[in-house]
Image (tube, rainbow, N blue to C red):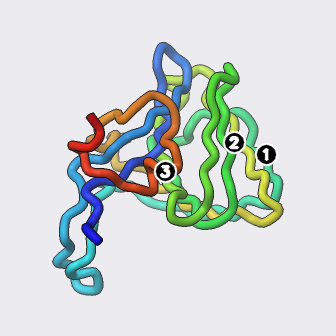
C-alpha cells in the first residue's frame, strides 16, 4: 500500500461575513519521517502552533452558536460533532478518531454569527483544541466548497488527483 500524499480536512472559514465550509488538501503533503519513534512513517506538519487544550464534552452537549475562539485545529479523539451554519445551508458530521480533524477559522473578526456545534452522541466527546501561532492559516488547496465527504477525507488523496 502506498503512503498518502496529503491530508484532506474540513475547514470552517468565512466569506462575506458568514461562516462557510470548505474541503482542504494540506500543503506540503506527507513526507517520510526521520524523527526517532516515527522514522519511516508518513508525517505531515500542521504548522506553527500556539498551545493546546483538552476538552471533555458531555454526552448530548450543545455548544450553541459561536465563532471559533482562535484560528485553530480541532481534533476529535472520540464521540461525534455535528456542526451547522446559521443560514442552515450546510452541515458537517465529524466523527471522533481517524477522520476527526477540523480546521476552524471563522473567528468573530471575519464571521458575524459563527457556527453551531452539537455533540449528539450518548458518550462524551474528547477533543483537542490547538490554536495556530499568530492565527496563521496553514497552506492548503481548496478541494471543493462544503465539508469533505468522508470517502475523500479517508483516502487522503494526492494533490494531482484533486483536479
Disc 2 residue crowd, few under 14, some 14–19, many 20+, Cα 10 Å: many
Of the image marks 3 and 1, the number of the one nearer the N terminus: 1
Closer to viewer: mark 3 or mark 2 = 3
Query: How many angstroms separate mark 3 from mark 2 (CA)?
Result: 22 Å
Q: Which residue is mark 2?
A: 117
Helix, strand or loop for disc 1: strand
Compared to residue 144, the image places residue 121 above or below, namely: below
Compared to residue 54, the image places residue 39 above or below, namely: below
Tag 3–tag 1 contact (CB < 8 Å): no
Q: Which residue is mark 3?
A: 151
Tag 1–tag 2 contact (CB < 8 Å): yes
From the top left corner, tell me how far across and down residue 7 is, in percent: 35, 53
Q: Which residue is mark 1?
A: 62
Query: How many angstroms separate mark 3 from mark 1 (CA)?
Result: 27 Å
**Residue 83 quadrant:** top right
**At 78% across and 52% down in the image, what residue appears?**
120
From the top left corner, tell me how far across and down residue 23 is, in percent: 43, 38
Amino acid at each position: 500500500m502506498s503512503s498518502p500524499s496529503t491530508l484532506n480536512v474540513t475547514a470552517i472559514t468565512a466569506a462575506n461575513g458568514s461562516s462557510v465550509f470548505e474541503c482542504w488538501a494540506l500543503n506540503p503533503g506527507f513526507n517520510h519521517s526521520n524523527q526517532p519513534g516515527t522514522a519511516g512513517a508518513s508525517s505531515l506538519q500542521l504548522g506553527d502552533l500556539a498551545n493546546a487544550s483538552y476538552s471533555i464534552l458531555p454526552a448530548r452537549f450543545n455548544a450553541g452558536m459561536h465563532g471559533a475562539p482562535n484560528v485553530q485545529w480541532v481534533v476529535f479523539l472520540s464521540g461525534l460533532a455535528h456542526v451547522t451554519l446559521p443560514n442552515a445551508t450546510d452541515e458537517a458530521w465529524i466523527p471522533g478518531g481517524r477522520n476527526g480533524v477540523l480546521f476552524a477559522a471563522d473567528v468573530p473578526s471575519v464571521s458575524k454569527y459563527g457556527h453551531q456545534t452539537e455533540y449528539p452522541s450518548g458518550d462524551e466527546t474528547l477533543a483537542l483544541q490547538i490554536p495556530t501561532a499568530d492565527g496563521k492559516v496553514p497552506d492548503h488547496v481548496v478541494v471543493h466548497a462544503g465539508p469533505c465527504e468522508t470517502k475523500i477525507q479517508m483516502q487522503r488523496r494526492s494533490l494531482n488527483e484533486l483536479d
